[in-house]
């Protein structure tokens, strides 16, 4: 009975030593595999946060500096048109209020009351559209920085491409637009 217990003890000790050694070796192998190719999982959220704080900063974080002027052109031009339409709307609204009060305005003799109302509606609609575009470009800036940071750790294969094509059919005289996926295997 003592011999069986000693053999059982020796057997279990050798197995546990072997298991500990194996786990240690696997840990070392895993560490050496990923040490050269570390992926920061917080990189996309950092890029999105930076773009939310200052538009274009997420693109700079992703080292895509050529996108920064595009971000500022989109947000800047829509912001410019927002302020331009807002000032024109205020100008026509002030003229309409003066006309209602019976006082002369800068558009006396040039525009009727209906013309002033129509101009106000047009400038208000354009102002609201410009505000929507400014917010949309701001959100697109954040989403683009996040997606670009996600795609940095993915391999990009040049064999897959998307090309828009215009296809003319004999059935109808109007062009049909579509997206074509081409896979070239070398």
Image: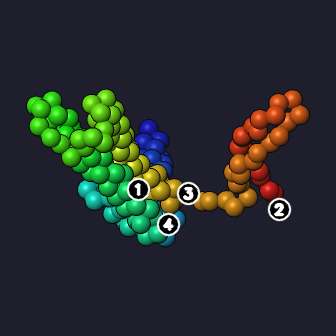
Return the disc, 4 or 2, that comes first in the chain's sequence. Answer: 4
Residue at numbered disc 2: 186
Tag 4: Cα neighbours inside 10 Å, few (<14), some, or many (≥20)? few
Q: Which residue is mark 1?
A: 74
Q: Quadrant of residue 157?
A: bottom right
Percent position (x, y) of residue 85?
30, 46
Residue 160 position, x and y percent, is 71, 54
Secondary structure under the numbered disc 4 in the rendered image: loop
Sequence-first disc among 1 and 2? 1
Secondary structure state at the residue bearing disc 2 = loop
Of tags 3 and 4, the one toward the viewer is 3
Q: Residues within 10 Å of mark 1 (few under 14, many from 20)?
A: some
Residue sitting nearer the eye, 74 or 102: 102
Q: Nearer the viewer, mark 1 or mark 2?
A: 1
Report how many numbered discs are placed on residues in the image: 4
Measure the C-alpha gap from mark 1 to mark 4: 35 Å
At 69% from the left edge and 61% from the top edge, which residue is drawn?
158
Q: Which residue is mark 3?
A: 154
Q: Earlier in the sequence, mark 1 or mark 4?
A: 4
Q: Is residue 81 visible?
A: yes
Pick whichever of labels 1 and 3 is earlier in the sequence.
1
Q: Residue at 89% of width from left, 34% of height from top?
A: 170
Q: Which of marks 3 and 2 precedes in the sequence?
A: 3
Q: Nearer the viewer, residue 140 or 124?
A: 124
When the figure is inspected, residue 171 is found, relative to residue 86, above or below; the finding is above
Q: Are marks 2 and 3 in contact (CB under 8 Å)?
A: no
- The answer to whether marks 4 and 2 mark residues whose Cβ atoms lie closer than 8 Å is no
């Amino acid at each position: 009975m003592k011999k069986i217990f000693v053999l059982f003890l020796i057997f279990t000790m050798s197995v546990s030593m072997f298991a500990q050694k194996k786990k240690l070796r696997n840990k070392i192998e895993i560490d050496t595999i990923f040490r050269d190719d570390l992926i920061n999982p917080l990189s996309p959220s950092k890029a999105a946060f930076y773009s939310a704080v200052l538009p274009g900063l997420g693109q700079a974080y992703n080292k895509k500096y050529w996108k920064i002027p595009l971000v500022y052109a989109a947000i800047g031009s829509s912001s410019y048109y927002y302020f331009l339409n807002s000032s024109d709307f205020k100008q026509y609204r002030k003229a309409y209020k003066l006309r209602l009060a019976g006082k002369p305005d800068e558009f006396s003799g040039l525009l009727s009351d209906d013309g002033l109302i129509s101009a106000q509606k047009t400038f208000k609609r354009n102002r609201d559209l410009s505000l929507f575009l400014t917010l949309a470009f701001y959100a697109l800036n954040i989403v683009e920085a996040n997606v670009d940071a996600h795609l940095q750790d993915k391999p990009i294969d040049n064999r897959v491409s998307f090309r828009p094509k215009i296809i003319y059919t004999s059935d109808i005289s109007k062009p049909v637009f579509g997206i074509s996926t081409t896979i070239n295997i070398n």
